[in-house]
Image (cartoon, grey):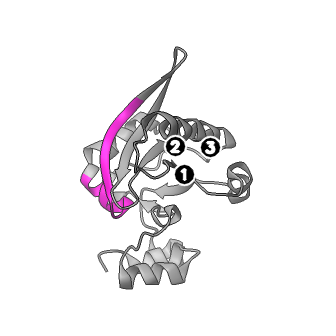
């Protein structure tokens, strides 16, 4: 009941996977196993508003870091906020940096307060490639990127990311569990 299993089952496209998670716990074997979709960030107490800005969302997540880490799942360790990357005088900022202790890799999180675009995926690809080439230590796995957004076009994401070994993921977030009326 406390994990809101019924609501998660109702919203999920992978009901068998959610039930397996509920009975056996989170089993992490591949990068795709690390990220939930959607993440429910009701603990932030933020209203769904078109005037929400990414910096307020980020500040709320940092203020509620323990709950956010629990919502992300097993094995995440916080590393940095607004990590600056400088490339030939241009500055880029990774919103949140984590290290995953089970997969032994960096996980970069980019927050979006709108629907995901292919430009967002390109930006994350830059961050992931930089971390793989400049920050990764011997023994670390490939860096993973997670873009948290309000909505996504699954087909556009699939074509932008392409085939092969997936290192960039997109997950939706929501601020409230749907009501009974919404589920009906």
Pointer 3: what residue? Answer: 121
Q: Nearer the viewer, mark 3 or mark 2?
A: 3
Q: Residue at x 52, y 64 (%)?
A: 32
Secondary structure category for the residue under label 3? helix
Q: Residue at x 45, y 35 (%)?
A: 94
Q: Quadrant of the N terminus?
A: bottom left
**Left or right: where does residue 158 sit relative to residue 43?**
right
Question: CB under 8 Å between callouts 3 and 1?
Answer: no
From the viewer's side, name the closer residue of 184 and 139.
139
**Left or right: where does residue 101 sit relative to residue 178?**
left
Pointer 2: what residue? Answer: 113
Pointer 1: what residue? Answer: 150
The answer to which of marks 1 and 2 sits earlier in the sequence is 2
User: Residue 95: image x %, image y %?
Assistant: 43, 37
Per the model, the C-alpha gap separating discs 3 and 1 is 14 Å
Q: Residue furthest front?
A: 138
What segment carries the magenta color?
Answer: 66-83
From the viewer's side, name the closer residue of 84 and 43.
84
The answer to which of marks 3 and 1 sits earlier in the sequence is 3
Q: Give above or below for 128 relative to 104.
A: above
Secondary structure category for the residue under label 2? loop
Question: CB under 8 Å between callouts 1 and 2?
Answer: yes
Q: Residues within 10 Å of mark 2 (few under 14, many from 20)?
A: some
Q: Residue furthest top?
A: 89
From the viewer's side, name the closer residue of 183 and 165.
165
């Amino acid at each position: 009941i406390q994990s809101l299993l019924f609501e998660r089952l109702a919203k999920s496209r992978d009901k068998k996977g959610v039930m397996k998670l509920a009975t056996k716990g989170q089993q992490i074997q591949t990068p795709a196993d690390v990220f939930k979709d959607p993440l429910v960030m009701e603990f932030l107490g933020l209203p769904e508003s078109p005037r929400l800005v990414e910096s307020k969302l980020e500040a709320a997540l940092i203020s509620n870091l323990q709950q956010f880490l629990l919502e992300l799942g097993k094995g995440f360790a916080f590393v940095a906020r607004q990590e600056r990357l400088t490339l030939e005088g241009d500055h880029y900022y990774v919103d949140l940096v984590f290290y995953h202790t089970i997969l032994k890799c960096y996980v970069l999180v980019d927050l979006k307060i709108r629907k995901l675009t292919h430009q967002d995926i390109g930006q994350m690809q830059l961050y992931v490639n930089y971390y793989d080439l400049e920050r990764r230590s011997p023994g670390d796995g490939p860096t993973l990127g997670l873009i948290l957004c309000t909505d996504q076009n699954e087909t556009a994401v699939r074509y932008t990311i392409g085939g092969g070994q997936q290192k960039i993921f997109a997950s939706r977030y929501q601020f409230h569990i749907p009501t009974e009326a919404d589920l009906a």
